[in-house]
Amino acid sequence: MGKPESPVGMVELAGWSGQKHRGFLERGLQLLLLLVTGALVALGLLHAAHSRGKQLTLFPSRLCFSKEEKTIVKRKPRAIPQPKEMDDICTSPGCVIAAARILQNMDPSREPCDDFYQYACGGWLRRHVIPETNSRYSVFDILRDELEVILKGVLENSTTRDRPAVQKAKMLYRSCMNERMIEKRDSQPLLNILDVMGGWPVTVEKWNEGVGPRWELEQQLAVMNTQFNRRVVIDLFIWNDDQNSSRHIIYIDQPTLGMPSREYYFNEGSNRKVREAYLQFMMSVATMLRADMNLPENSYLVQEDMAQVLELETQLANATAPQEERHDVTTLYHRMSLEDLQNKFGLKGFNWTLFIQSVLSSVKIKLLPDEEVVVYGIPYLQNLEDIIDVYSARTMQNYLVWRLVLDRISSLSQRFKDARANYRKVLYGTTVEEVRWRECVSYVNSNMESAVGSLYIREAFPGDSKDAVRELIDKVRAVFVETLDELGWMDEVSKKKAQEKAMNIREQIGYPDYILEERNKHLDEEYSNLNFSEDKYFENGLQNLKAGAQRSLKKLRETVDQNLWIIGAAVVNAFYSPNRNQIVFPAGILQPPFFSKEQPQALNFGGIGMVIGHEITHGFDDNGRNFDKNGNMLDWWSNFSAQHFRKQSECMIHQYGNYSWDLADNQNVNGFSTLGENIADNGGVRQAYKAYLKWMAEGGKDQQLPGLELSYDQLFFINYAQARPSPRPAATPLVRPQVWCGSYRPEFAIQSIKTDVHSPLKYRRLPLRRGHPHAPARALPRLVAMGEPHCVAHAHPPAEARCPFCARSWSSGRGQHRVRPAPGAQPRHPGRVAPPGALRLQPRALRPSPGDLFNCLHPLSKASLSAVQASDLS
């Protein structure tokens, strides 16, 4: 849209028509002034054209033309633009701040159709350097940093009026900040718990003779699980039964490892450096603790023992299934009796009943005669059979205790963190520890999220935001349901089931009401078993570990609480839980650039609207689609629809799998592991945009931002591009564009491409750009008869297929382009051919518009259709 006329200009126009009597000299001077002004403007334009080669307006509606081909089009005379009303421009503080943010983050010198990421985020990338404490830095990280500043203020503000839960949160924070006492106590708190664990053999003289003969793996694994909430070697946890969402059940699965990804244990290249640093870290800590226990230095023993630990963990890593093989929950789920578990996975004498009962006894639960368990990790348990009896009790105990020590390093004195520094540098690329207060704020918020959330809500969250977000959810969900009717590859029976599920999705917005209700004692009861001391940060952490384990285990005999919040309020993220068919938007994400009642709706739809669409779509992605409207794992798809969904999925898997990331040693994105998030990204932006257009068509009145020549459509996509979140690991098994703006260190890029279920930031805005120079071939959607897009291979996609800022008129109408069959389209895989009648767009010289963006999105987003228990936005 053009820039509104100023009030001065309007007054001048009115003044000209109102003057009836002027002298000849006055009129002559005015005419001369006009001629001079016109000449100066013309000279300026000619000079700009000569020096820069082309006109460069600040935020133009750009065209993308092929250099090989020019099209001459006769244009109709343009209508004379009418002056806009002043109320079209929003000048509130919120709008001014939003306009400044967008201006700073963009790089208007870049062509949006060539590289939309740089166009939307180039300014941000140019102005921000990754802090030495960070492995990645993005708009999302900045929002989290700002939230932590608020939490620091409320946690350091102690008053006598604080309720017990809040008092404990502030006590925990003070104990974390009490570095003088932490340094004074040094390693002693850790040495005390090593005795509880039966000792760390590498730091104990004659462990083989003393403790070794009495050592039992079942008991040691149970202690790790119940006392320290560390599920090592065998992952036993309690969660909703996938097939009956109203009850809880015991799950057995493959465990996590000491390093972030299984690939670090046996691949070469940069992985070898990580392994070497990891081994050195183990040896350094063991040597330090031996010295603290007044044992003689024995570097040979330490190296031999720790090398055995790494060898054992390498075998365990090799036994685990890769992430891409664990994508289908229906193939993971195997429910069986304890007797069947023992018969199928004897593990050379491992007593499953003893192990499970030892775990449950910590919360006074007895196994039932007909107790059932769900085994997720069958391939792992089969492989574990050949590992568990090969290694001695000493090596097994060394490994278990190492995993505990590794987890507790952050609670110890500085010298232990210094011993970890090189490993972190090789793994993450960071050279400096996080500033202490941020570490403490994050820790307290993670462990006492309800108490901390209550402080955040009172300090920073406007209560009326809940209703506004709920209205946006209703609008986006309505569009999703309407979109289902457009699908040609989904039959009517499946469409009806999908619509029922979408309408049955429950939402949680902001925070649970009880955390602000002074008379409601639930918040205080949640932390009633915790008794912290300001001088004992290490022991406070152990209390949190034990409380977390007990809270989870006690659920086994409890009915599932469908109103339970799966995350705290002071969190910048959003979630979908397939077991609950529930979407969650914590208060922490309901802030600019995602959402504000003080900014135009184009930004809200492009921000939190996209997030809403993303989470709704998770209910129908490759994992969420396996659950019905009540959160039960049930195949409600017809064979016809399921088969076509899988075919559509293959297209997206190969499309993203063809993108290589230069920062990650040019490794390719894992199209299988990232499929669910890629579906959600594509579907989310499509639903949000359609919802915005529908709101406008139904009479919604939006406002422009000052200083920007961006249409409402463009504002939507710019905020989508600038506001997209970045990955952040979840602490529990939950299922993350200028939101897209961000930078990685190469070390962390290598890690995240192995472990993250989200694509790298630069590829998460692919709906706005269908091509990439590093992809030799890619699957692209094309228009076909009846308006249904298909995936076809094309090695050199035309610009109009890549970018909503090009090859479309910015008007709302369709049909302003010609279509013709795609010539010579080559199949992406041998034996596969492009769909009959596949069409491609033939551009005309029109002003660009995203009005038909939907046809530029992947076919799966036409469906608008995560990890194990829930999917997070970032």
Image: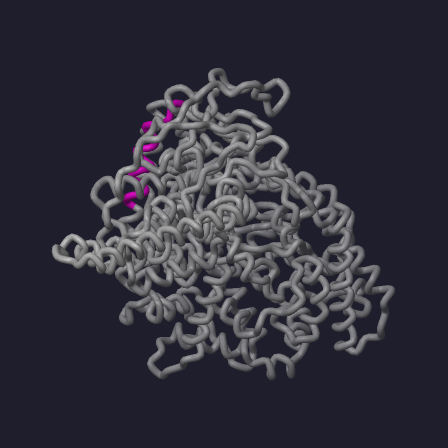
Image coordinates for residue 733, horizontal then vertical, percent: 51, 51
Vertical placement of residue 129 versus 1, above or below: below
631 with respect to 471 (left or right): right
Confirm whether the magenta stretch covers residue 480: yes
Q: From the viewer's side, name the closer residue of 226 and 674.
A: 674
Residue 128 appears in the figure: yes
Which region shows up in magenta? Answer: 474-489
Residue at point 36% right, 55% down? 36
Colour setup of the view: one colour
Q: Quadrant of residue 137?
A: bottom right
Residue at point 67% right, 39% down? 382
Q: From the viewer's side, name the closer residue of 343 and 405.
A: 405
Q: Main secondary structure of the magenta part?
A: helix
Residue 243 appears in the figure: no
Image coordinates for residue 221, horizontal then vertical, percent: 63, 56
The outermost residue toward the front is 24
Q: From the viewer's side, name the closer residue of 377 and 736.
A: 736
Q: From the viewer's side, name the closer residue of 391 and 351.
A: 391
Image coordinates for residue 758, horizontal then vertical, percent: 53, 46
Vertical placement of residue 735 versus 791, above or below: below
Q: How many marks?
A: 0
The outermost residue toward the top is 836
Residue at point 75% right, 77% down? 292
Residue at point 36% right, 78% down? 162
